[in-house]
Image: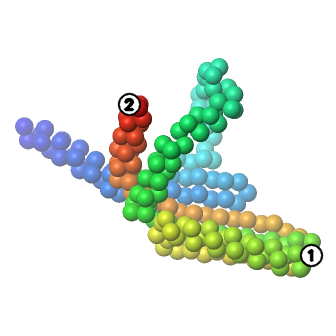
Amino acid sequence: MKIVLLILGIIILAVLFVVFFPLRVVFEYTDKAKFKVYAYGIKIYDSQKPRTEEQKKPLPQSEESNSGNDLVERLKKNFGFLKEILKLIVEKAKKYAIIKNIEVRYRFGLSDAAVTGIYSGVVYGVVNGFAAFLRNYFRIKNQKIDVIPDFDNKVQEFEAKIELIVRVVFFVPVMHKVIKLVHEKKEV
């Protein structure tokens, strides 16, 4: 009996450990996009990892889903449902997700210094507007945004890194609500 209780206690402790501790999601862009997910410092997903032949096989498609118009029609039909799920995810993200680090470096130069100056004003507005948008939905610990106009050379260099910390417990209420919404949708 003691062994069963000990094993049950270890299982419960492991489940609590998994549920309440965070996942670290890293998105990087230098030459191409990279997406990585870490749990407890161990990489559990890497978009740069080569896929196996089994993963590369295309999924079988039915004849009905081959047309692009069919997809558009289904999206229109389920727009309210998708909007409610997105609203829930954003609402819960404020509570359970933190942007630990945002680093953006954009160096640009156009053919003319005057055009580069005008373009830099537009870029500053867009980048800072996006940062303000993120601050509305996430807590941001560290933010470093460098917009560097180069008035002498014609150049385009962009690098970005966003590190997001999400507690796994975030997915519990979201999945519960999604299942509830799907069930309600089926009843209608």
In the picture, measured across the screen, residue 32 lies left or right of residue 164, that is: right
Which corner quadrant of the image does residue 122 belong to? bottom right
Amino acid tagged 2 = Glu
Q: Nearer the viewer, residue 113 or 155?
A: 113
Residue at (51, 44) in percent of width and height: 80
Label 1 secondary element = loop
Residue furthest front as drawn: 188
Please state the horizontal and vertical placement of residue 157, each as a whole percent of the image: 77, 66
Amino acid tagged 1 = Asp
* Residue 52 makes an appearance in the image: no
Residue 33's tag is none
Please state the horizontal and vertical placement of residue 186, each as a whole percent of the image: 41, 31
Q: Nearer the viewer, residue 117 or 98?
A: 117
> Which circle's residue, 2 or 1, is located before the other in the chain?
1
Quadrant for the N terminus, please: top left
Label 2 secondary element = helix
Q: Which residue is mark 1?
A: 112
Quadrant for the C terminus, please: top left
51 to 29, vertically: above or below: above
Which corner quadrant of the image does residue 5 belong to? top left
* Residue 114 makes an appearance in the image: yes
131 to 177, vertically: above or below: below
Residue at (13, 38) in percent of width and height: 4
Observer-side mark, 2 or 1, equals: 2
Q: Are marks 2 and 1 in contact (CB under 8 Å)?
A: no
Which corner quadrant of the image does residue 104 belong to? bottom right
What is the C-alpha distance between the residues marked 2 and 1? 62 Å
Q: Which residue is mark 2?
A: 187
Residue at (38, 30) in percent of width and height: 187
